[in-house]
Image (tube, rainbow, N blue to C red):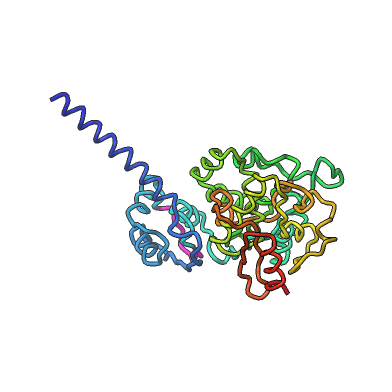
Amino acid sequence: MKKIIAISISVIFVILISGILIYNYKISTPISQTAKDVSFVIKSGEGVKSISADLLAKGLIKSKLFFELYIWKNKFGSNLKAGEYVLSPSLSIKEIVRTLIAGNVASKEKTIKVIEGWNSKEIADYFETEGMFKSDDFLNLTGYPKIDYRENKTLMKPFDYSANYTFLTDKPSYRGLEGYLFPDTYRIYKEATPDSVIRKMLNNFDNKLTPELRAEIKKQGKTIYEIVTMASIIQKEVRNEKDMKIVSGIFWNRIKNKQALESCATLAYILGENKAQYSYEDTRIDSPYNCYMNRGLPPGPISNPGIEAITAAIYPEDTNYNYFLSSSETGETIYSRTFEEHVRNKAKYLR
């Protein structure tokens, strides 16, 4: 009898723990990472059950149960504010509820789309163009591209966010946040400060770099900073996920074999100019970011990569390819195994 009771208690305990884990997963995980914004209205006096039904119908949540359970558990039922919102399936239940409680209605917000592969200066200029705040106010906090703040004493040192974000602990303190300003579509208050926007982007990075990805980086004996730096190059070199993984394999093999990466993306970062082909003189530019002149990774990221590029940097695909280029007409990635084949491909595909 005692054995049966003990087994029953163990089963109940396992079910309870499993239920807690499932609940936490359901309220913290969005339906989609890439879905478009959706207009959503809460009418004055509308109840939780009606709101949850509407959220489900709009494709913003997967389950009414977990939404209502989260509201009930936290006693938020009377805190949801009426109004018109712009929500996204890329928001978790917790984030949706936070928005509905804060009353962040559409009229107070604007949509900001940060493109994968933009560097910090391009992002800052975009915010200024959108009429949010000055580019320099943003860069004074994030740091300017390519700057080593040990050597540059004229610029204000960027703000240190590492106390709030563990993924920044292996980033050199004398480098800015290039690489960590996660590209995505954001809903941002029109009067948002540079600091609040930066934290929103860093929070997004923190969510996207899952514990599994961090564990794999550690297992490989790499740092997050190295992965983000590699991902930033991959992001600028090729367009789709499959090519990213192949190019990642080529680049990591070059590092393993103590070869120069010879990435044209690093030349574009130095020059601030994209070219179909770079001259011999371009490849001789005196810069620590010149991956023709210097072996290994550059001193830091050259862009702000998306999750596909980051994942590719962590999980490279091993192939027999040693070289690649992007067709100047179609953008297709052309691979080759030998240098001679690569030279022929350059003559054929680069105009």
Query: Is residue 170 shown left or right of residue 13?
Result: right
Compared with 198, 150 (above or below) is: above
Query: Magenta span covers which residues?
Result: 78-87
- Please identify the residue farthest to the left as the structure is shown: 1
Q: Nearer the viewer, residue 210 or 12?
A: 210
Q: Residue at x 40, y 45 (%)?
A: 24
**Residue 298 placement (x, y as % from top left):** 73, 48
Query: Is residue 176 shown left or right of residue 68?
Result: right
Q: Nearer the viewer, residue 334 or 30?
A: 334
- Please identify the residue farthest to the top as the structure is shown: 2
Position of the C terminus, as image quadrant, is bottom right
Position of the N terminus, as image quadrant, is top left
**Residue 42 placement (x, y as % from top left):** 43, 64
Q: Nearer the viewer, residue 140 or 322?
A: 322
**Residue 46 placement (x, y as % from top left):** 38, 62
Compared with 151, 283 (above or below) is: below
Q: Nearer the viewer, residue 107 or 329?
A: 329
Q: Is residue 145 visible?
A: no
Q: Residue at x 66, y 42 (%)?
A: 161
Q: Quadrant of residue 164 in the image?
A: top right
Q: How many marks?
A: 0
Q: Is residue 338 magenta?
A: no
**Residue 54 placement (x, y as % from top left):** 37, 65
Compared with 268, 157 (above or below) is: above
Q: Residue at x 82, y 61 (%)?
A: 280
Query: Is residue 1 shown left or right of residue 171?
Result: left
Q: Is residue 214 visible?
A: yes
